[in-house]
Amino acid sequence: MDRGTVGSTNRGRLLVEVRSVGRSEVVTPAGELDHHTAELLSEPLDEALDRGRSRLVIDCSQLEFCDSTGLNVLLGARLKAEAAGGGVHLAGMLPVVARVFEITGAEAVFTLHDDLEDALRD
């Protein structure tokens, strides 16, 4: 499912794709996750949880940037998923995004995977 894009140039754009793989809902944000684009990610995460899909795998391999607003979207989804008996798995983070999680300590509260295949195997 294509969630659309926002922004008028490459900066500030985010495309989110969603698909079900086994017991996981795989959400792939591509581009920049920030205060302008966070809703494009939060909506499909909430929709997946509303449908009972509590194991969320975020394929971060195409995520080029994540600010504190984007981090808060992921933290909120994690709390909701865990309350429903699931969790949020982050896969394939690029170094620039991984650094945000490292600096804030958020890496300690997520299940991290080297790539999508590893996250789906887990």
Image (cartoon, rainbow, N blue to C red):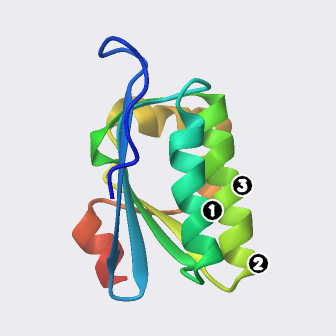
Residue 119 visible? The answer is: yes
| Tag 2: amino acid | Ala
Q: Where is mark 2, residue-wise?
A: 83
Q: Residue at coordinates 64% horizontally, 74% vertically from top-left?
A: 50
Q: Which residue is mark 1?
A: 46
Q: State the SS at label 3.
A: helix
Q: Residue, x 33% and y 50% (percent of image)?
A: 2
Q: Is residue 101 left or right of residue 114?
A: right
Location of the C terminus by quadrant is bottom left
Residue 111, image x, y percentages: 51, 66
Mark 3 vs mark 1: in front: 1
Q: Nearer the viewer, mark 1 or mark 2?
A: 1
Question: Which element type, helix, strand or loop, lies under badge 1?
Answer: helix
Of the residues shown, which amino acid type is indicated by label 1?
Answer: Asp
Query: Can residue 105 be seen in this snapshot?
Result: no
Q: Are marks 3 and 1 in contact (CB under 8 Å)?
A: no
Residue 56 location, x and y as percent?
49, 70
Mark number, residue 11: none
Mark 3–mark 2 distance (CA, rounded to whole Å) = 11 Å
- Residue name at image x 72 percent, y 68 percent: 80
Sequence-first disc among 3 and 1: 1
Helix, strand or loop at label 2? It is helix
Q: Amino acid at mark 3?
A: Gly
Please tell me in which quadrant of the rendered image residue 22 appears: bottom left
Residue 47 vs 98, above or below: the answer is below
Is residue 66 left or right of 118 when viewed as pictured?
Answer: right
Q: Nearer the viewer, residue 20 or 90?
A: 20
Q: Earlier in the sequence, mark 3 or mark 2?
A: 3
Against 105, residue 46 (above or below) is below
**Badge 1, how many Cα within 10 Å: few under 14, some, many 20+?**
some
Q: Which residue is mark 3?
A: 76
